[in-house]
Image: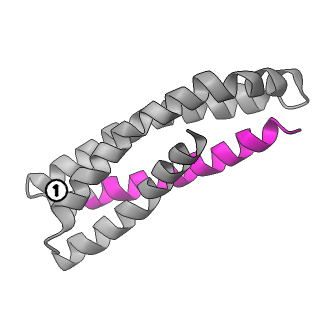
Amino acid sequence: MNTLHLLLGLSLIVLPVIIIEGLRKKASWVKPTVLATAIISWVMLLPAGINYIVSYAPKKAIIKAGTSPWIHSILMETKEHWGILIPVIVTVAAGLVYSGKAKESERWWILTIVLSIAMAILGFIIFNGSRI
């Protein structure tokens, strides 16, 4: 599940970049890519939830007992809440594309990229925090 979570997360960085370029070129493949990206954003909640329940529980105990308990208290809590927002943001962006407001969707795709990168960085810190 960790690998699936990582791959889906990376796709939510790469696909919006591709979508923005496609929107600027008015490419015919954009709408199916937008739809796939929206679906991926919602599907990602499944491995994320499984990872949290199965894999993160022992790491959480290690982090909270270690020298950096703030890693869970601040970073993981932030990651959990932002993670729930990403599918909503992607769905809004996709809806804008499908309703003919492609230009307006660009900000939402950029927000998706920024939040997805932030999530990756937080995940890296949290993962390494369980090793401290």
Residue extending furthest bottom?
A: 25
Residue at x-position 57% and y-position 35%:
79
18 w.r.t. 45: above or below: below
Q: Quadrant of the C terminus?
A: top right
Relative horizontal placement of residue 18, taking residue 101 as reference (left or right):
right
Q: Mark 1: give few (<14), some (14-19) or many (20+) Cα within 10 Å.
A: many
State the colouring used for the structure image. one colour
Q: Which residue is at the front of the view, 12 or 115? A: 12
Q: Quadrant of the N terminus?
A: top right
What are the residue bounds of the magenta stretch?
A: 106-132
- Image quadrant where residue 106 sits: bottom left
Q: Secondary structure at mark 1?
A: helix
Q: Position of residue 108 (x, y in %)?
A: 32, 52
- Image quadrant where residue 45 sits: top left
Q: Position of residue 27 (x, y in %)?
A: 17, 75
Which residue in the structure is indicated by mark 1? 97
Q: Evaluate whether residue 90 shows in this view.
A: no
Residue at x-position 30% and y-position 68%:
20
Amino acid beneath label 1: Val
The verdict on residue 108 being magenta is yes
Residue at x-position 73% and y-position 41%:
127
| Magenta stretch: dominant secondary structure | helix
Relative horizontal placement of residue 121, taking residue 34 as reference (left or right):
right
42 w.r.t. 111: above or below: above
Q: Evaluate whether residue 50 shows in this view.
A: yes
